Image: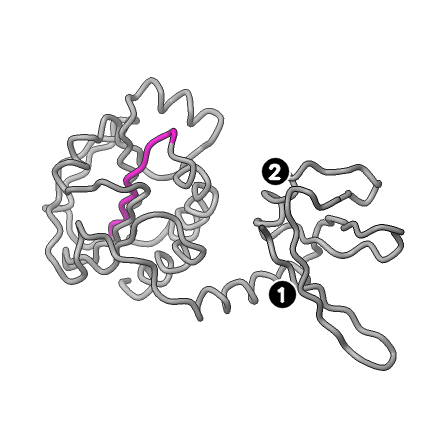
Amino acid sequence: TLIILLGYCTAFSQQTRSIKLDQNSIVKDLQGNVIHYNIWQNLVQTDEFDIKLNRDATAEEFIIYRLNDGEKAVKIERKRARMASMPEPVESTSFKKGSKFRFDKLSDINGNKFDFKKDTGSVVVYNFWFINCPPCKKEIPDLNQLAIKYEDKNVRFVGIALDDEYSLRKFLKISPFLYNIIADGRYLAQKHAVKSYPTHVVVGKDGLVKFSTVGLAFNTVYWIDKVIAESL
């Protein structure tokens, strides 16, 4: 169930209504076409779209619309403020904050080799994931934005996937993932006692774990971003 606060002003007062939208809610685009629940739910969770009450309709229905730049900036700021006010996501039991990270020699599916035990000086962000993990796939667009944001910084993004290289290449053609992808990473997950997915770890330049979490909370990517910035 998605809860949206719809604010509107009248000449005499300002009111805010809390309305619950679910799979039975009628949501239309600006042309009057009914939008399927899964589609509008995914769109609203981005920073590009929002929903408002259609006050011209005889029955309760809603309109999904694309935000302009100003509206988008407001939505992003409110979203960040909400995430900042929430508790830190649950820590992984496999990676305790302040502990020494056990680096491995790695080679991604494009032939890039990594040995962070020797190549120090970078913040390293790990993501343990697999293709058929719904929350793993859901967070990829936001993780890609992180990779773009820190592209020119001393930050390395490593995605340790349980899947084989063939399956990964097929998946990545449809859903690009801008991390350095490591195939057949089950042995690495076992080595680090990773049992829940996705699992995220941020390792500082000193080789110590700065942050870790399991699953996908509303503010997971916010915290990864926050800790990266603090570690640079």
Colour scheme:
one colour
Q: Residues within 10 Å of mark 1 (few under 14, many from 20)?
A: few
Observer-side mark, 1 or 2, equals 2
For image coordinates 22% across by 60% down, the residue present is 210
Viewer-nearest residue: 23 or 41: 23
Q: Position of residue 132 (x, y in %)?
A: 38, 29
Q: Which residues are magenta?
A: 124-132
Q: Amino acid at mark 2?
A: Asn
Q: Residue furthest top?
A: 166
Q: Which residue is mark 1?
A: 74
Quadrant location of residue 205? Answer: bottom left
Instruction: Using residue 186 as the reference point, say whether residue 173 is left or right of it.
Output: right
Q: Which mark is residue 38?
A: 2
Q: Position of residue 19 (x, y in %)?
A: 68, 60
Label 1 sits on a secondary structure element that is helix
Q: Which mark is residue 48?
A: none
Q: Is residue 128 magenta?
A: yes
Label 2 sits on a secondary structure element that is helix
